[in-house]
C-alpha cells in the first residue's frame, strides 16, 4: 500500500500538472465533425467552483479569460481551416491551470467522382482496369472507396494519407473479364468515415460515379449442354432447343436428315428453338455461331417403339404405309416445293418442354 502511494505521488510529480488530474473540464459535445465553412459551437464546463476564470484558446474566435463562471461557450461562425484544435482552460484559485482540447475534424465532400477506363469492350479472360478519380476530398485518411458491381461490393480501398487539407485520390480496380459480367454495371462510391454507424452528414444524395456498363465478348455457349436423345412418334410435334448465350448474340444453323435443297437455302432458319412435326428419325444438328466461335449440338431422334398388340401392329402397319405413301408422295411432289416442314411450324421463342 505504502509503495503504491509512493509511486502514485511520483507519477503525479513527473507529469508536472497535478491539477489536470482533478480539475475535470467537460466539453460538450466532446468531439466535433464539421464541414469546411460551416459553423459549430461547444460548451466547456468546470466541475469545480473554485475557479479564477475560464477561457478558450483558438487560432480563430478565441474567448478571453472570463471570471466568475463555471461554464463558457465557444462558437465558430465559419470554419476557416483544415486543422483546428480549440482548447478550453480554467485557472484555479491556487494558481494552477488545467486545459482540455476539443478534437475538431474538418471535412469536405469530393468535387467530383469519375471513372476512367480505356476499354469499353473486353474479351473474356482479358485483364482490364477501371480507375475511380475522386477530386478534392478531406480528410483523405478517413476516405474509403467502395467498388460495386450490380450492388455487390467487390473492392474497398482506404488511403494512408497524412494531409488534412483536400487532396485528389484514385482507386484502380483490376478485373479479369468473365462472361457472367457481360452487361453488369460497375461504379465506385467514395465514403468519408467520420461518423459512427447510423450517423452521417446532413442527408443528401449518395456520392458516386456514373455507372459503367461492362461488355464482355465471348463465344456461344449452350444453356443446356448435352446433346439430346429423343423418341418421337411420326406426326407428333418436336421441339428442338438450341438456345445459346454469347456476345455478340449467336446466329443458328440447322441441319436435318434428308435435308432438302429448299431447307438449306432458307436463310431465315436462324431460330434457336424449332417446333416442327416429326417425320424422319436421325441426327438433327444445330450450330450456334458468331465471330467469337461456334458450338454444335446434336439431337439424336429415333422413332418410338410401337406396342406389340395386334391392334398396335395394325396401327403400326397403317402408319408405316402412311409414312411410305407420304414419303413417296413427298418425293414425287418435291420439285413443286410442297415437301417442306410447315413454315408456320417453327416458332421463335417457344420454350422447350416435354414433347
Ligand atoms: C453550458 O453548460 C452549462 C452546464 O451544463 C449550462 O448551464 C449552460 O447553459 C450551457 N451553455 C450553453 C451556451 O449551452
Ligand atoms: C485517364 O487515365 C489516364 C491514365 O492514368 C490519364 O492519362 C488520363 O488523363 C485520364 N483521363 C481522365 C479523363 O481523367
Ligand atoms: C502509412 O504511411 C507511413 C509513412 O509513409 C508509413 O510509415 C506507414 O507504415 C503507412 N501505414 C500503412 C498502414 O500503410
Ligand atoms: C479517421 O481517421 C483517423 C486516422 O486514420 C482515425 O484515427 C479515425 O478513427 C478515423 N475516424 C473514423 C470515424 O473512422
Ligand atoms: C446500361 O445498360 C442498361 C440496360 O442494360 C441501360 O438501360 C443503360 O442505359 C446503360 N447505360 C449506359 C451508360 O450505357
Ligand atoms: C467452327 O469452329 C471451328 C474451330 O473451332 C472452325 O474450324 C469452323 O470453321 C467453325 N465453323 C463455322 C461455321 O464457323
Ligand atoms: C442415336 O441414338 C441411338 C439409340 O440411342 C444410338 O444407337 C446411336 O448410336 C445414336 N447416334 C448418335 C449419332 O448419337
Ligand atoms: C404442331 O404445331 C403446330 C404449330 O404450332 C400446331 O398448329 C399443331 O396443332 C401442332 N400439332 C400437334 C399434333 O401438336
Image (cartoon, helix red, strand yellow):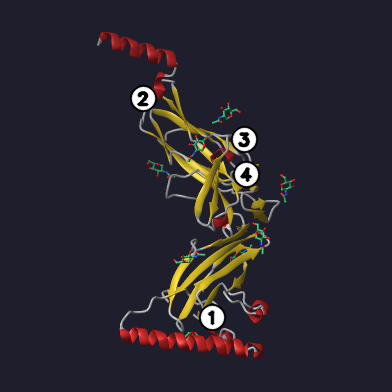
Of the residues under marks 3 and 2, which one precedes in the sequence?
2
- Can you identify the residue that label 4 sits on? 172
SS for dot 3: loop
The CB of the residue at mark 1 lies under 8 Å from ligand 8: yes
Screen quadrant of the N terminus: top left
Please tell me which residue is depicted at 47% across the width and 42% down the height of the picture. 42
Going by the image, does 294 lie left or right of 118? left
Of the residues under marks 4 and 3, which one precedes in the sequence?
3
- In depth, the one of 164 and 287 nearer the eye is 287
SS for dot 2: helix
- Can you identify the residue that label 2 sits on? 22
- Can you identify the residue that label 1 sits on? 347
Residue 298 in picture, x, y percent from top left: 53, 66
Crowding at dot 1, Cα within 10 Å, few <14 / some 14-19 / many 20+, comes out as some
Foreground: disc 3 or disc 2: 3
Query: Residues under labels 4 and 3: Cα distance?
Result: 21 Å
Query: Residues under labels 2 and 4: Cα distance?
Result: 51 Å
- In depth, the one of 336 and 85 nearer the eye is 336
Residue 174 in picture, x, y percent from top left: 61, 45
Q: Is residue 147 above or below residue 139?
A: below
Query: Residues under labels 4 and 1: Cα distance?
Result: 47 Å
Crowding at dot 4, Cα within 10 Å, few <14 / some 14-19 / many 20+, comes out as some
Amino acid at each position: 500500500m505504502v509503495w503504491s502511494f509512493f509511486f502514485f505521488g511520483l507519477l503525479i510529480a513527473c507529469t508536472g500538472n497535478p491539477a489536470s488530474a482533478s480539475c475535470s473540464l467537460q466539453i460538450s459535445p466532446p468531439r466535433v465533425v464539421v464541414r469546411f465553412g460551416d459553423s459549430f459551437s461547444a460548451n466547456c464546463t468546470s466541475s469545480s467552483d473554485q475557479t479564477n476564470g475560464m477561457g478558450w484558446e483558438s487560432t480563430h474566435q478565441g474567448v478571453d479569460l472570463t471570471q466568475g463562471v463555471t461554464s463558457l461557450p465557444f462558437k465558430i461562425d465559419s470554419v476557416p481551416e483544415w486543422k483546428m484544435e480549440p482548447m478550453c482552460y480554467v485557472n484555479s484559485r491556487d494558481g494552477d491551470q488545467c486545459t482540455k482540447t476539443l478534437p475538431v475534424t474538418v471535412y469536405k465532400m469530393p468535387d467530383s467522382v469519375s471513372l476512367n477506363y480505356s476499354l469499353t469492350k473486353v474479351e473474356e479472360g482479358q485483364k482490364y482496369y477501371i480507375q475511380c478519380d475522386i477530386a478534392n476530398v478531406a480528410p483523405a485518411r478517413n476516405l474509403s472507396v467502395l467498388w460495386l458491381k450490380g450492388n455487390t461490393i467487390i473492392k474497398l480501398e482506404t488511403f494512408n494519407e497524412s494531409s488534412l487539407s483536400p487532396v485528389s485520390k484514385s482507386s484502380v480496380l483490376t478485373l479479369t473479364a468473365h462472361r457472367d459480367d457481360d452487361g453488369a454495371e460497375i461504379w465506385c462510391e467514395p465514403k468519408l468515415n467520420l461518423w459512427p454507424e447510423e450517423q452521417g452528414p446532413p442527408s443528401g444524395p449518395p456520392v458516386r460515379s456514373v455507372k459503367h456498363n461492362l461488355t464482355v465478348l465471348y463465344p456461344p455457349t449452350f444453356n443446356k449442354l448435352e446433346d439430346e436423345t429423343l423418341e418421337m412418334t411420326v406426326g407428333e410435334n418436336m421441339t428442338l432447343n438450341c438456345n445459346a448465350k454469347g456476345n455478340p448474340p449467336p446466329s443458328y444453323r440447322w441441319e436435318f436428315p434428308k435435308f432438302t435443297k429448299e431447307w438449306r437455302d432458307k436463310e431465315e432458319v436462324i431460330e434457336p428453338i424449332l417446333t416442327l412435326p416429326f417425320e424422319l428419325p436421325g441426327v438433327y444438328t444445330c450450330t450456334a455461331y458468331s465471330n467469337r466461335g461456334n458450338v454444335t449440338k446434336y439431337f439424336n431422334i429415333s422413332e418410338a417403339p410401337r406396342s406389340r398388340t395386334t391392334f398396335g401392329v395394325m396401327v403400326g402397319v397403317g402408319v408405316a404405309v402412311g409414312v411410305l405413301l407420304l414419303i413417296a408422295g413427298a418425293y414425287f411432289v418435291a420439285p413443286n416445293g410442297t415437301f417442306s416442314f410447315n413454315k408456320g411450324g417453327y416458332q421463335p421463342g417457344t420454350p422447350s418442354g416435354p414433347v
